[in-house]
Amino acid sequence: MADMKIPYLVIKRGLAFWQPTKAMRAEGARARALGPEGPDAWRKAAALKYCEREADPSLGVRNLEPKPRQALWEHGEVVRLAKGAWRSGYRGLAAAIAVLWDTSLSPVDVRSLTPQDRQGDAPGSGPPGGKLFRVERAKTGRAAIGTFGPRSEKLLDAYLADLGAEIAPNAPIFRCRSGAPYSKDKLGHDFRVVRELVFGPGESRTLADLRRSGTIEAIRGGAADTQIAAKMTNRFDKSSSLRRTYAPVDLACAFR
């Protein structure tokens, strides 16, 4: 059990004393003996109004839920990021940004995508090379389908052709400029470099904010909560916490 903390309480040879400061003594406060150290000396401190009898000491250490991030990217800004990354030589990052935006997958899930995860449009159809990824989400282990449009498909295919070497079916697709698969830290680092090149040093929005932004785009377009939950492979339609995280207040949504 944590020690009880009472202001100005001191222990001397097993006895408890309420000891005012010099400034308090100058105003007339005097030290008081409270008896043997322990609960009796405390509830007594409360009776003398030196502390609050009913106060909950755990209030000072409550693990309050932090406010969710509210930062959003607009579609045009994401296009600028992808183009800036491509033109600056960060072509794996450019393709990853495009796929992350369209699929609403998390950065860790996108980093894990492999050629064998890419499939045709229809369920179970065709070899790798389609417009969707079938994956098992790293955070929940649930199966997810990430669909992407023609622009992202074109950028992804251009990136794969630019690699100049075939990637093994079970190897990560997105790679940094050295050719090594992106790690969490390297992906974040390269994104910050490109973000500063495109928007300047004052920009603080992150790669992870793209997922929230995609959700807002879906809401603006009229998507139902159940559709968003299916797209994100979570309980967005039932969890107020997830709604606060991925659907902050947005004027375009409020007046759609």
Image: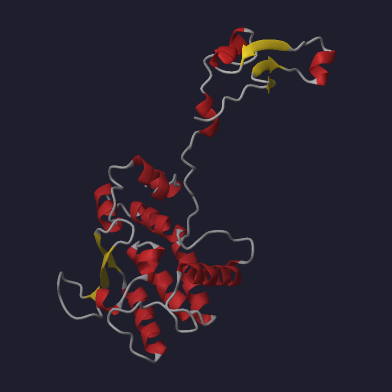
Can residue 129 be spotted in the picture?
A: yes
Which of these two is toward me, 193 or 136? 136
* Residue 234 coordinates in the image, percent (x, y): 29, 52
**Residue sitting at the far top:** 47
* Residue 164 coordinates in the image, percent (x, y): 39, 92
The image shows residue 68, relative to residue 173, as above or below, that is above
Q: How is the image coloured?
A: secondary structure
* Residue 227 coordinates in the image, percent (x, y): 25, 53
The image shows residue 221, relative to residue 38, as above or below, that is below
* Residue 140 coordinates in the image, percent (x, y): 30, 56
In the picture, residue 202 is in which quadrant? Answer: bottom right
Q: Tell me: 219 left or right of 17.
A: left
In the picture, residue 3 is in which quadrant? Answer: top right
Residue at the image position 45 percent from the left and 60 percent from the top: 208
Q: Tell me: 124 left or right of 12.
A: left
**Residue sitting at the far right:** 26
**Residue sitting at the far bottom:** 164
Residue at the image position 44 percent from the left and 63 percent from the top: 75
In the picture, residue 94 is in which quadrant? Answer: bottom left
Which of these two is toward me, 28 or 2? 2
